[in-house]
Image (cartoon, rainbow, N blue to C red):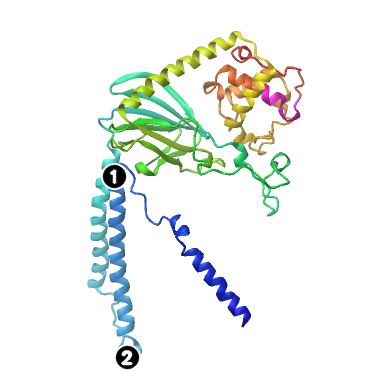
Amino acid sequence: MQSFAKRCSSIGLALATVTSTSVFAEWQLDMTPGVTEVSQQVFDMHRTMLWWCVAIGVVVFGAMFYSMIMHRKSKGHEASQFHESTSVEIAWTVLPFVILILMAIPATKVLIAMSDTDDSALTVKITGSQWKWHYEYLDWEGQGGLDLDYYSILSTPSEEIIRPVLASGLFPKNTAKDSYREDGIYPERDELYKRDVDKPLIIPTGRKVRFLITSDDVIHSWWVPDFAIKKDAIPGFINELWTLVPEGKEGIYRGQCAELCGKDHAFMPVVVEARSVEDFEKWMVDAREAQKAEALAAANSLDKTFSKEELMAEGEKHYVARCSACHQANGQGLPPTFPALAGSKVALGAVADHIDIVNNGKNAMPAFGSMLSPKEIAAIVTYERNAWGNTPSDGIDVVQPRDVAK
């Protein structure tokens, strides 16, 4: 009896928890209506199809249960025979066909609207690249040659990501030695865990924006639910899609790579910031000036000599942002796909070979020569040759930008 009371108490507590306001507040059973006209059309179509399916279900199951109850064998009814009935065959073929046609009409209208990229004010090329997005601004109001592009990468600190679970037995290979903490206290994961980037895609409101989607390694998928747009990024192919964020809907909208593009698929968030046309044009001028300044600084860095401490500090920052997803923050890698750098032949071998791999990539590793400046690559190479107890065999533990640019 006591056991029964305990079970009732547990069930009551579970029901109270499930039905509490705070729990329901995290639920979302319906699609998001989004912010654009197309997303509203998709949402309305979803609602329409849902209620059509509900109506069909009510009719079908209503007829079935009515027949089972009112014409059951215990009341003396005998089952009707429809075997080889031409009328029934025609009815259950034609009726679903008509329903599907009626459903296809509004769906086709929405698909045609989603594919219409004409009269776009801004064109942006988006390239998926293990595991980052490359945004290139190609045209704005008929002004080509904008000369503005940048990479957008995950900004979540690696300390929030690496969290071995020793007690449960789930112990990620080669991650425990440096990242496991005896006290079990790890950095808190904030609300934007794996959902924020260093540089969002900036677009104007009130203007049609056309996106050209491709990839330079594996298949990715660029997805922003609030815009109801999602398109695969396939190497060798250019796909198109568009959006138009209404004026007054300025803000930040988040999405994700929706393709299983690799083990670090979750490290490719999409962040889009919609600004007014005036703010967008001002940002574009400032961004182009900043990009020119960075290029000039990179060119000037070739004549400078940086200390080991400066290169190590900058190298760790860039390594954590761009390399740690594969090779891990502790340099242990994820063999056999992503080898360890701690004690590796590359990090301890000839410096020219080390620079060549970072510059040009190898196998699944992307070429960072087109993404980073000589100084940033020099800093990464210097960091890898000195971190985790590494001591290069050729005695070259500091790499200058001019060594990379040779």
Q: Is residue 219 above or below residue 7?
A: above
The x, y position of residue 99, in whole percent, is 25, 60
Question: Does the segment drawn in magenta span residue 383?
Answer: yes
Foreground: 308 or 396?
A: 308
Where the N terminus falls, by quadrant? bottom right
Residue type (three-letter) at the residue carrying disc 2: Lys
Foreground: 157 or 319?
A: 157
Badge 1, how many Cα within 10 Å: few under 14, some, many 20+? Answer: few
Give the structural element (helix, strand or loop) at label 1: helix
Q: What residue is pinned by disc 1? A: 111
Q: What residue is pinned by disc 2? A: 75
The x, y position of residue 406, in whole percent, is 60, 11
Q: Residue at x 31, y 50 (%)?
A: 43
Residue type (three-letter) at the residue carrying disc 1: Leu
Distance of mark 1 from mark 2, alpha carbons?
A: 52 Å
Foreground: 217 or 127?
A: 127
Part of the protein shown in magenta = 382-390
